Image (cartoon, rainbow, N blue to C red):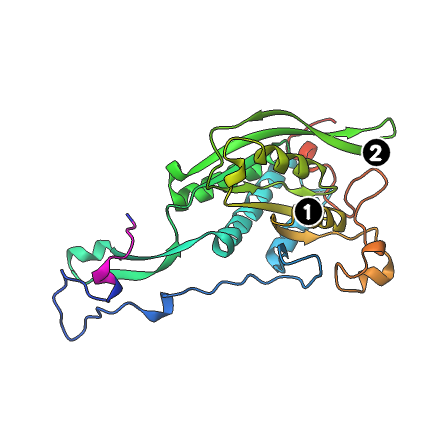
Amino acid sequence: MLTRRGAAAASGRNPTARRNPGSRSMPDRSYRRLVYRPQQIPHRYGKNIHVLSDPVLVSRVLKLSLPDTRGIEGGQLLCAIYRSLIHVVMAAEFPRTSVSVLTRMARSAPDAVWSGEVIDPETRAVTIGVARAGLLSSQVCFEEMGLLLGERNVRQDFLMAERKVDRRGRVRGAAVSGAKVGGSYEGRIVIFPDPMGATGGSLDLGIRFVRGQPGGDGIAKIIVINLVVTPEFLRRMRDEHPDVVVYAARLDRGRSSERALQSLPGTRPGEEFGLNEHGYIVPGLGGLGEFLNNAEH
């Protein structure tokens, strides 16, 4: 079990160790302060927006969108993508602490102490499963955070957010029709692993809903994790929720002008779009919630 570093560990001394010429009692300076900066695509959407530059992630997202990819395989791809994404988020955004830990080798080597910086095991987090496309990704994040932080420090809540469409099939907003909240949000990092960042309507409602719950005004940080985002989504998050942090595997600008596509993302907002007239992402993934759940509509 991890313990915070005491005075002896901070000084590099292990009081139980018997010194010998080959032993090392000082911590390895390489792990005193870990620097982690994920590779990102340059843009001008704001400092809290992170569009990752990862060939494996982009390749998996592409495979997920292919016509011959089936639902079961798609679910496996989604899980693999979100395991990578939540690892990036935890490494980049979660608080850290210094520890000094006796390993199992201490049975035969009393000086087997590892000292260094790790993710703070006392970090408390909640992942929000937004039905229906966001349920599987939320479960992945819940499990991965639980392995790192322990089950008592993680929780999974659920929201039912529905798009409102008109008679022509155009998206006209969203509504929260149900929720299952398991406790206070005070002091917790709140994760929204919602695959498709299209208009931002569902996420906007979800964020406002969570902030209105018990402990909502004391949330440590809100992080949105998307597979694909549009310029419209990123602008909405930046303008309406500037403190929210966004991580995305891919940015889709399929309805932008040629000039915008040849420019740094975010520099030509009047020409930069990723939604069609019905409010769906282009090139996008094509109805991910329906696809993952074998739904007819």
Overall secondary structure of the magenta section:
loop
Q: Give residue 234's position: percent from left, percent from top.
A: 71, 50
- Earlier in the chain: of badge 1 and badge 2, it is 2
Graded by Cα atoms within 10 Å as few (under 14), some (14 to 19) or many (20 or more), the crowding at tag 2 reads some
- Type of amino acid at the residue the image marks with label 1: Met
Which residue sits furthest top?
A: 178
**Residue at horizontal 14 percent and vertical 63 percent from the top:** 17
Q: Is residue 52 visible?
A: yes
> Which residue is label 2 attached to?
170
Q: Nearer the viewer, mark 1 or mark 2?
A: 1
Q: Is residue 267 left or right of residue 137?
A: right
Identified at 28% across, 47% down, the residue is: 1
The quarter of the picture where the C terminus appears is top right
Q: Quadrant of residue 102?
A: bottom left
Q: Is residue 277 magenta?
A: no
Outermost residue toward the left?
18
Residue 273: x and y in percent read: 81, 51
The Cα–Cα distance between marks 1 and 2, rounded to whole angstroms, is 21 Å
Q: Compare residues 138 and 208 and report the one nearer the observer.
A: 208
Q: Mark 1: which secondary structure?
A: helix
Q: Which residues are magenta?
A: 2-9
Q: Residue at x 21, y 57 (%)?
A: 105
Which residue bears the numbered disc 1? Answer: 237
Q: Residues within 10 Å of mark 1 (few under 14, many from 20)?
A: many
Q: Position of residue 11 (x, y in %)?
A: 24, 66
Numbered tag placed on residue 8 in the rendering: none
Above or below 235: residue 166: above
Is residue 216 toward the left or the right of residue 255 in the image? Answer: left
Position in image of residue 266 (x %, y %)? 75, 58
Q: Residue at x 49, y 36 (%)?
A: 185
Residue 135 visible at all: no
Which residue is farthest front?
217
